[in-house]
Protein backbone atom coordinates (compact mmCIF):
# COMPACT_ATOMS: atom_id res chain seq x y z
CA UNK A 1 0.00 0.00 0.00
CA UNK A 2 2.79 2.39 0.92
CA UNK A 3 4.53 1.62 -2.35
CA UNK A 4 1.31 2.35 -4.24
CA UNK A 5 1.00 5.78 -2.64
CA UNK A 6 4.66 6.48 -3.36
CA UNK A 7 4.03 5.74 -7.06
CA UNK A 8 0.86 7.88 -7.07
CA UNK A 9 2.74 10.69 -5.35
CA UNK A 10 5.57 10.46 -7.85
CA UNK A 11 3.15 10.62 -10.79
CA UNK A 12 1.34 13.58 -9.22
CA UNK A 13 4.65 15.35 -8.71
CA UNK A 14 5.56 14.84 -12.39
CA UNK A 15 2.16 16.17 -13.50
CA UNK A 16 2.44 19.21 -11.22
CA UNK A 17 5.96 19.88 -12.47
CA UNK A 18 4.74 19.67 -16.06
CA UNK A 19 1.82 22.04 -15.42
CA UNK A 20 4.10 24.45 -13.59
CA UNK A 21 6.54 24.30 -16.46
CA UNK A 22 3.81 25.08 -18.97
CA UNK A 23 2.63 28.04 -16.87
CA UNK A 24 6.16 29.39 -16.53
CA UNK A 25 6.80 28.93 -20.25
CA UNK A 26 3.49 30.57 -21.20
CA UNK A 27 4.10 33.50 -18.86
CA UNK A 28 7.61 33.94 -20.18
CA UNK A 29 6.40 33.76 -23.78
CA UNK A 30 3.62 36.28 -23.12
CA UNK A 31 6.08 38.59 -21.39
CA UNK A 32 8.41 38.35 -24.38
CA UNK A 33 5.57 39.23 -26.77
CA UNK A 34 4.48 42.14 -24.58
CA UNK A 35 8.03 43.46 -24.35
CA UNK A 36 8.44 43.11 -28.12
CA UNK A 37 5.16 44.99 -28.71
CA UNK A 38 6.19 47.82 -26.39
CA UNK A 39 9.69 48.08 -27.84
CA UNK A 40 8.52 47.86 -31.47
CA UNK A 41 5.18 49.68 -31.39
CA UNK A 42 5.59 50.78 -35.01
CA UNK A 43 5.46 47.09 -36.02
CA UNK A 44 1.91 46.70 -34.69
CA UNK A 45 0.05 48.76 -37.29
CA UNK A 46 1.29 49.73 -40.74
CA UNK A 47 -0.33 52.21 -43.15
CA UNK A 48 -1.17 49.33 -45.49
CA UNK A 49 -3.02 47.26 -42.84
CA UNK A 50 -6.73 46.53 -43.46
CA UNK A 51 -8.93 48.15 -40.80
CA UNK A 52 -12.44 47.11 -39.79
CA UNK A 53 -14.34 49.60 -37.68
CA UNK A 54 -13.73 53.21 -36.70
CA UNK A 55 -10.18 54.16 -37.76
CA UNK A 56 -10.03 56.55 -34.77
CA UNK A 57 -11.23 54.00 -32.18
CA UNK A 58 -9.62 54.13 -28.74
CA UNK A 59 -8.96 50.38 -28.63
CA UNK A 60 -7.14 48.53 -31.38
CA UNK A 61 -7.25 44.77 -31.78
CA UNK A 62 -4.27 43.75 -33.90
CA UNK A 63 -4.81 40.26 -35.25
CA UNK A 64 -2.05 38.34 -36.93
CA UNK A 65 -4.16 36.31 -39.30
CA UNK A 66 -3.73 33.35 -41.64
CA UNK A 67 -6.59 32.85 -44.13
CA UNK A 68 -5.93 29.08 -44.05
CA UNK A 69 -6.19 28.90 -40.24
CA UNK A 70 -9.34 27.18 -38.94
CA UNK A 71 -9.18 29.06 -35.63
CA UNK A 72 -8.91 32.39 -37.47
CA UNK A 73 -12.05 31.40 -39.35
CA UNK A 74 -13.85 30.57 -36.09
CA UNK A 75 -12.80 33.85 -34.48
CA UNK A 76 -13.69 36.12 -37.40
CA UNK A 77 -17.39 36.53 -36.44
CA UNK A 78 -16.44 36.88 -32.78
CA UNK A 79 -14.04 39.75 -33.45
CA UNK A 80 -16.45 41.32 -35.90
CA UNK A 81 -19.19 41.33 -33.23
CA UNK A 82 -16.79 42.88 -30.71
CA UNK A 83 -16.11 45.74 -33.11
CA UNK A 84 -19.72 46.20 -34.21
CA UNK A 85 -21.05 46.29 -30.64
CA UNK A 86 -18.46 48.80 -29.40
CA UNK A 87 -20.16 51.97 -30.71
CA UNK A 88 -17.00 52.99 -32.54
CA UNK A 89 -14.66 52.40 -29.60
CA UNK A 90 -12.92 49.30 -30.97
CA UNK A 91 -11.30 48.63 -34.32
CA UNK A 92 -9.67 45.57 -35.87
CA UNK A 93 -6.36 45.80 -37.69
CA UNK A 94 -5.47 42.76 -39.79
CA UNK A 95 -1.85 41.70 -40.13
CA UNK A 96 -0.81 38.62 -42.05
CA UNK A 97 0.97 35.57 -40.66
CA UNK A 98 0.94 33.09 -43.57
CA UNK A 99 2.10 30.05 -41.59
CA UNK A 100 0.32 27.42 -43.70
CA UNK A 101 1.45 26.30 -47.13
CA UNK A 102 -0.41 28.30 -49.79
CA UNK A 103 -1.50 31.06 -47.41
CA UNK A 104 0.81 33.58 -49.05
CA UNK A 105 -1.04 33.10 -52.33
CA UNK A 106 -4.39 33.52 -50.57
CA UNK A 107 -3.18 36.76 -48.96
CA UNK A 108 -2.11 38.12 -52.35
CA UNK A 109 -5.55 37.39 -53.81
CA UNK A 110 -7.32 39.06 -50.88
CA UNK A 111 -5.08 42.10 -51.16
CA UNK A 112 -5.73 42.30 -54.89
CA UNK A 113 -9.45 42.44 -54.08
CA UNK A 114 -8.73 45.21 -51.56
CA UNK A 115 -7.12 47.27 -54.31
CA UNK A 116 -10.62 47.46 -55.79
CA UNK A 117 -12.48 48.04 -52.52
CA UNK A 118 -13.70 44.45 -52.21
CA UNK A 119 -11.54 43.17 -49.36
CA UNK A 120 -14.16 42.19 -46.80
CA UNK A 121 -16.41 40.56 -49.38
CA UNK A 122 -13.46 38.53 -50.64
CA UNK A 123 -12.35 37.62 -47.13
CA UNK A 124 -15.79 36.35 -46.13
CA UNK A 125 -16.03 34.26 -49.30
CA UNK A 126 -12.59 32.82 -48.57
CA UNK A 127 -13.44 31.95 -44.97
CA UNK A 128 -16.81 30.43 -45.87
CA UNK A 129 -15.14 28.06 -48.34
CA UNK A 130 -11.94 27.51 -46.36
CA UNK A 131 -12.46 23.73 -45.96
CA UNK A 132 -12.47 23.36 -49.75
CA UNK A 133 -9.42 25.38 -50.76
CA UNK A 134 -7.25 25.32 -47.63
CA UNK A 135 -6.89 21.60 -46.88
CA UNK A 136 -3.45 21.45 -45.27
CA UNK A 137 -2.44 18.27 -47.11
CA UNK A 138 -3.35 19.73 -50.52
CA UNK A 139 -4.07 23.48 -50.45
CA UNK A 140 -5.56 25.04 -53.57
CA UNK A 141 -5.54 28.80 -52.93
CA UNK A 142 -6.01 29.54 -56.64
CA UNK A 143 -9.61 28.37 -56.16
CA UNK A 144 -10.21 31.74 -54.53
CA UNK A 145 -10.31 33.40 -57.93
CA UNK A 146 -13.44 31.41 -58.79
CA UNK A 147 -14.97 32.04 -55.37
CA UNK A 148 -14.69 35.83 -55.72
CA UNK A 149 -15.35 36.01 -59.44
CA UNK A 150 -18.81 37.54 -59.02
CA UNK A 151 -18.15 40.29 -56.47
CA UNK A 152 -17.48 42.91 -59.12
CA UNK A 153 -13.72 42.73 -59.65
CA UNK A 154 -11.79 43.59 -62.75
CA UNK A 155 -10.23 40.13 -62.76
CA UNK A 156 -7.40 40.91 -65.17
CA UNK A 157 -6.30 43.83 -62.98
CA UNK A 158 -6.73 41.80 -59.79
CA UNK A 159 -4.53 38.97 -61.07
CA UNK A 160 -1.87 41.44 -62.19
CA UNK A 161 -1.97 43.20 -58.81
CA UNK A 162 -1.76 39.89 -56.92
CA UNK A 163 1.54 39.16 -58.62
CA UNK A 164 2.85 42.71 -58.45
CA UNK A 165 5.64 44.18 -56.32
CA UNK A 166 3.42 46.30 -54.04
CA UNK A 167 1.53 43.34 -52.57
CA UNK A 168 4.72 41.28 -52.37
CA UNK A 169 6.34 44.05 -50.31
CA UNK A 170 3.28 44.35 -48.07
CA UNK A 171 3.43 40.64 -47.32
CA UNK A 172 7.16 40.76 -46.60
CA UNK A 173 6.60 43.61 -44.15
CA UNK A 174 3.88 41.73 -42.28
CA UNK A 175 6.04 38.62 -42.00
CA UNK A 176 8.95 40.72 -40.73
CA UNK A 177 6.70 42.42 -38.15
CA UNK A 178 5.29 39.07 -37.08
CA UNK A 179 8.80 37.86 -36.33
CA UNK A 180 9.79 41.11 -34.62
CA UNK A 181 6.75 40.84 -32.35
CA UNK A 182 7.47 37.14 -31.66
CA UNK A 183 4.11 35.99 -32.97
CA UNK A 184 4.40 32.29 -33.79
CA UNK A 185 0.79 31.12 -34.07
CA UNK A 186 -2.54 32.27 -35.44
CA UNK A 187 -4.67 34.02 -34.61
CA UNK A 188 -2.31 36.19 -32.60
CA UNK A 189 -4.13 38.99 -30.78
CA UNK A 190 -2.53 42.13 -29.35
CA UNK A 191 -4.94 44.69 -27.87
CA UNK A 192 -3.56 48.22 -27.39
CA UNK A 193 -0.09 46.70 -27.15
CA UNK A 194 -1.08 43.95 -24.68
CA UNK A 195 -0.95 40.37 -25.99
CA UNK A 196 -3.80 37.99 -25.25
CA UNK A 197 -2.32 35.89 -22.44
CA UNK A 198 -4.78 32.99 -22.36
CA UNK A 199 -6.42 32.11 -25.64
CA UNK A 200 -10.21 32.04 -25.85
CA UNK A 201 -13.30 34.06 -26.68
CA UNK A 202 -14.00 35.07 -23.08
CA UNK A 203 -10.37 36.00 -22.54
CA UNK A 204 -10.31 38.20 -25.66
CA UNK A 205 -13.51 39.96 -24.61
CA UNK A 206 -12.10 40.53 -21.13
CA UNK A 207 -8.89 42.02 -22.52
CA UNK A 208 -10.84 44.35 -24.82
CA UNK A 209 -13.04 45.46 -21.90
CA UNK A 210 -9.94 46.03 -19.76
CA UNK A 211 -8.44 48.29 -22.43
CA UNK A 212 -11.75 50.10 -22.92
CA UNK A 213 -11.86 50.90 -19.21
CA UNK A 214 -8.31 52.26 -19.38
CA UNK A 215 -9.23 54.38 -22.40
CA UNK A 216 -12.27 55.83 -20.63
CA UNK A 217 -10.39 56.67 -17.45
CA UNK A 218 -9.79 60.42 -16.91
Image: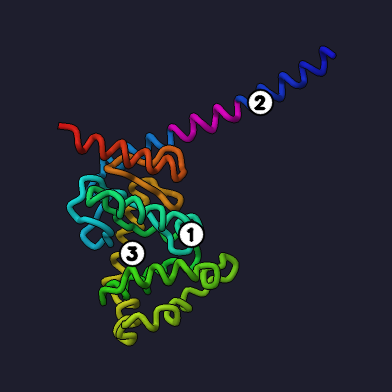
Name the residue: 39% across, 83% down. Answer: 149
Indicate whether residue 23 is drawn in magenta.
yes
Tell me which segment is drawn in magenta.
17-27
**On residue 171, which mark appears?**
3
Image quadrant containing the C terminus:
top left
Residue 128 vs 20, above or below: the answer is below
- In this view, which residue lies farthest toward the top? 2
Looking at marks 3 and 2 on the same chain, the residue that comes earlier in the sequence is marked by 2
Residue occupied by mark 1: 69
* Residue 165 found in image quarter: bottom left
Q: Residues within 10 Å of mark 3 (few under 14, many from 20)?
A: many
Percent position of residue 126, x then y = 44, 70
Image quadrant containing the N terminus:
top right
Looking at the rendered structure, the secondary structure element under dot 1 is loop
Q: With 173 as the anchor, is 21 left or right in this view?
A: right
Percent position of residue 6, x then y = 76, 16
Name the residue: 26% across, 40% down. Answer: 212
- In this view, which residue lies farthest toward the left? 218
Looking at marks 1 and 2 on the same chain, the residue that comes earlier in the sequence is marked by 2
**On residue 14, which mark appears?**
2
* Residue 7 found in image quarter: top right
Percent position of residue 173, x then y = 30, 59
Amino acid sequence: MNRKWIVVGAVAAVVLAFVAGVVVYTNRTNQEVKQAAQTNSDALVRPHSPIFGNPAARVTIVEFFDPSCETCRAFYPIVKRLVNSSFGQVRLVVRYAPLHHGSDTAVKILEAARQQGKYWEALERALAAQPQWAAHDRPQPEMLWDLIGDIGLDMAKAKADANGPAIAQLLRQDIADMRTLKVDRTPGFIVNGTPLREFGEAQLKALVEQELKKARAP
